[in-house]
Amino acid sequence: MASHDLPLAANQLGLAQLNERSREIFRQIVESYLATGEPVGSRNLSRILPMTLSPASVRNVMSDLEQLGLVYAPHTSAGRLPTEIGLRFFVDALMQIGDLAEQDRKAIEAQVAASGQGKSVEAVLTEASGLLSGLSRAAGVVLTAKSNPRLKHIEFVRLEPERALVVLVGEDGQVENRVLKIPIGLPISALTEAANFVNARVRGRTLEEVKAEIETRLMEGEAELDQLTQKIVAAGLASWSGGENEERKLIVRGQAHLLDDLKALADLERVRLLFDDLETRREVIDLLGRAQQAEGVRIFIGSENKLFSLSGSSTIIAPYHDASGQIVGVLGVIGPTRLNYARIIPMVDYTAKVVSKLLGR
């Protein structure tokens, strides 16, 4: 299910170097951190281990784990926390990823399906990011594809003597507007004729397809339009090339969840840095865009992802598809490195599949 870039140290380490006792102590340190965010000491570990070990024996193992780069002591106390390499090793080699609970499946299906009834793709995706945020208690994120919806119709509306509004209506209910410069004294009939000419060719096709055909017709002189109307048609279509609607949209929901469970001032500072990172939309978009190059869930932990290295955050994301099976965006969760990976990975995976199925209709 999950594909990601494995850091060299964790990769070289291998399970072979950890015997069953070391593995169990390491697992308990990580699981305690994921549950509480706190370091765990040898005395507490010796109480909860399934095997009988003295605190001194546990300390020896913890020291070995520290030398391997899997755990560290945040201060001089005996407690240990997992390093980022340790977390990656845990996620890749030790963690059991279960199936999603039936009630979670039903909640995801119901919420995404309800949001899809007669609403735009963006409304569905906004709902999906809010849903992931609520289920994970972290921030839900969605990166939409560059918008290239199938079209329903186009209108030209005069605003003032030298300006007209071009209105593009998609089959999914999205409406895009652009303002167009027009010659002074242009008759209303030219705008009507331009709209009729384009509308005869748009329904059910993407803007790219329509532009390609109409540009060919205009160049070959096959369009039975006067020159002024031809100019309006060409300008109307050109107003969309490279325009706002081709920008990817970043939808973030539930940042407030990141403030729910702060343990210390250091946590607050990390969350503040994460909020700052989320504000730098371009970098977030570039990061999420990387997930579109691979099928399945991708996991970035801490500094594996340069953008979030300061805030010590993790990202769990999966691509979603359109009706033709093309990857058109990614969705997932951003939060502290102590996310509940075992629960969130299948949740993100399943939500991506449900959204893909809905968009496929």
Image (cartoon, rainbow, N blue to C red):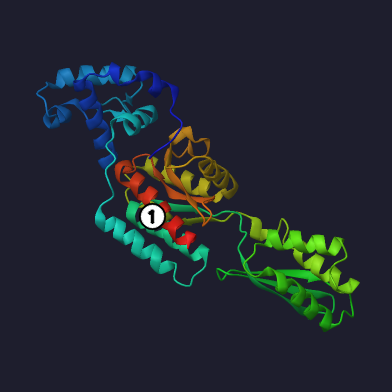
Q: Which residue is mark 1?
A: 132
The residue at 34%/46% (across/down) is 346
Q: Position of residue 333 (x, y in %)?
A: 41, 48
Quadrant occupied by the N terminus: top left
What is the residue that sits farthest to the bottom in this orientation?
Answer: 188
Q: Position of residue 358 (x, y in %)?
A: 44, 61
Q: Position of residue 331 (x, y in %)?
A: 46, 51
Secondary structure of the residue carrying numbered label 1: helix
| In this rendering, position of residue 219 left or right of residue 87 | right
Nearer to the camera, 60 or 296 = 296
The image quarter in which residue 109 lies: bottom left
Q: Position of residue 266 (x, y in %)?
A: 39, 40
The residue at 41%/21% (across/down) is 9
| In this rendering, position of residue 29 left or right of residue 203 | left
Q: Is residue 303 above or below residue 211?
A: above
What is the residue that sits farthest to the left in this orientation?
Answer: 52
Q: Is residue 167 above or below residue 112?
A: below
The residue at 32%/29% (across/down) is 93
Nearer to the camera, 271 or 165 = 165
Q: Is residue 174 above or below residue 313?
A: below
